[in-house]
Amino acid sequence: MNYLIVKDKKKKQVIYFECNKLNGYQMTAKNKNIKLKDAINVNKMVIINPSFINKLIDKNINRKLEKLIKYIIGIYDADDDPAGNLMLALNEVEKFKREIINKYLAYMNKKQLKDLDQKLKILENQVTMQSYLLNESKINNESYETSKAR
């Protein structure tokens, strides 16, 4: 049975809604194996309040953006194959964009979309610029080494 319980301090009554018919941001539990005694186990929540949805989405996006930035920084520090790693970083940025479009686009306002788009463009530009610099340094090193070998 799906229902929503709202307790209003003024009315002191419980209101029931059918969750399947409500439009809102759906959340599921990350760890579904937790069972507590004398507690209600929640599998899924539907959040209807728009300001709360915006705060949750901002928090989720910022957390994922931080992980993406840490991943890109880790790629810069790695010594094995920088050119291939930079392409992986561009792929991760594109994957993040697609995830945002698929999951959060319906709940985001224009300002949030604009800010996120600017951040992602900055990330993409930095990674592509680093890739170009790396390729130019490789070309310069190779041309220097080939001229020296002759």
Image: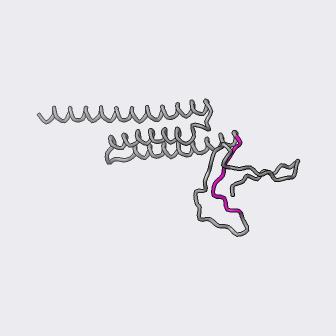
Residue situated in front as seen by the camera: 70 or 5: 5
| Residue interval drawn in magenta | 40-49
Percent x, y for residue 1?
A: 69, 58
Quadrant of the drawing holding the C terminus: top left
- Per the image, is 89 magenta? no
Give the quadrant of residue 134.
Answer: top left
In reply to whether residue 43 is colored magenta, the answer given is yes
On the picture, is 104 further left or further right than 20?
left
**Residue for point 62% across, 50% down:** 27
Give how far across and how far down residue 131 sits, in percent.
Answer: 35, 35
Which residue is pictured at 37% across the width and 47% down the height? Answer: 78
Nearer to the camera, 76 or 41? 41
- Vertical relation: 48 (above or below) 137: below
Prevalent SS, magenta region? loop
Q: Is residue 136 left or right of residue 146?
A: right
Q: Residue furthest left?
A: 150
Q: Is residue 126 above or below residue 52?
A: above
